[in-house]
Amino acid sequence: MNVGIDNIDDGIYNICSLIHNLVNIDVEFFDSFHNSSLQLFKFQKPLIIEDLRFSSILDIENLLKNKKSNDLLYYTDNFNLNYLCLGIFTEQNYSSGTIIVGPFLSDIPDDLLISKVIQLNNLPLGYRQELREYYKALTILDSKTYKNIGSLMVNLSSNPLINTNISFVQNNNGISNIKDSQEIDDRKFYSDIEFRYKLEREIQNSVAKGESEEALKLMNSFEFNPTHRVPNNPLRAWKNYGFVINTLLRIGADKGGVSPIYIHNISDKFAILIEKVTSKAELDSLLKDMTLQYCDLVKSFSISQYSPVVGKCIDYIKINFYNKISLKTISNEIGISPSHLSRSFKKETNFTITEFINKVKIEEAKVLIKQNELSITDIALKVGFENHNYFCSVFKKLTSYTPKEYLLKA
């Protein structure tokens, strides 16, 4: 946790510290001169967000001037990040400063959200990965939770905190576990273990092939109760089980020929979401979604049918398509002669490298056109075309539509 304190009132500090420790979300206090006097942060914000957020702070402070002491402001900035904001009042006058809790998200972040943020703020596509990692680490709050946090903020600011005296009592009387005293059928025990590991291999193979229906069917027959591993905390046991399944599916995607770059992103995302579940039912739903997404990953990004050289080339293009790349650029990166790479790529994919680069660019452009938030010229520049007419020509060649026709069709 990063902590910064600058001449902060004890009452304000106690309120901010209590909220931060309870909900594990960033809390910051701005004084009446717009100075950040207290920062309780989990981790550092990306510089691009840090550099552009001052205008949001001024906007929040201006909005709070017209509020009452028990009014809470739910503020969403231009990065689609949410904040709970509370003005600190003196005799009903907003003059003492502002407590800001956040950022947090209201839904699971996906690539569509990241694309919209990049478009809205006119950012280079090179920021995509950094933003994706940052958003994955943010807390997701539903309406009930953020309302409860807001209620806590208002009440804490209106009433002085009372010091708490804690008495510690430990009960050392053990409780016998009836199950431990029962005779265990060894043959059934080992048979269950063998079946479970066989089922795990079958699930991995289904994911490796991108067979989502078969993978879900196998997952539904995967009966295992891990609660004996953490007897006093069954939810913790189920979360640990979720991490095991995440690893299982990740290995399946790796066997399916998906680049570690893509696997890492989805694996990290679900590790964070598993830790945030509050019930087994919520975990069951998440595991189903996780299985489907790993299978979709294999369908979309598997390079198992290609040689290692061509596979590396495909990965490089998909990650760097918005930059100015060429056969020479890629061959230097991979460490192979341009002529050999060109022949191998054409033989295995039926595309020249230039054709494949354009194909990837146009697929990204189709997503941006459907969002209908940028001009065609801006979209062309975003995906790496320097010439508007050439972009339109390539788009028409690959889709049979002009960009404008595609927009109307979408």
Image (tube, helix red, strand yellow):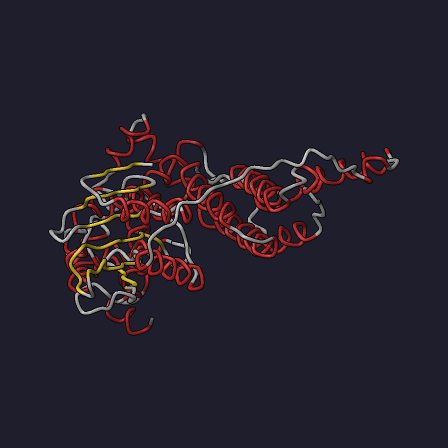
User: Which residue is drawn at the image coordinates 55% and 49% (left, top)?
Assistant: 210
Quarter of the image that includes the N terminus: top left
Image side of residue 10 versus residue 181, left or right:
left
In-front residue for pair 302/286: 286
Quarter of the image that includes the C terminus: bottom left
Q: How many labels does the image show?
A: 0
In-front residue for pair 146/277: 146
Percent x, y of residue 375: 18, 64
User: Which residue is drawn at the image coordinates 43% and 61% (left, top)?
Assistant: 142
From where the camera sits, is residue 363 visible?
no
Percent x, y of residue 183: 88, 35
Q: In this view, does 147 lie above or below 243?
A: below
Image side of residue 402 versus residue 388, left or right:
right
Which residue lies most toward the bottom here?
408
In-front residue for pair 101/87: 87
Percent x, y of residue 373: 23, 65
Which residue lies most toward the left here?
33
In-front residue for pair 128/82: 82
Image side of residue 181 versus residue 139, left or right:
right
From where the camera sits, is residue 210 visible?
yes
Percent x, y of residue 407: 28, 70
Image side of residue 331 versus residue 289, left or right:
left
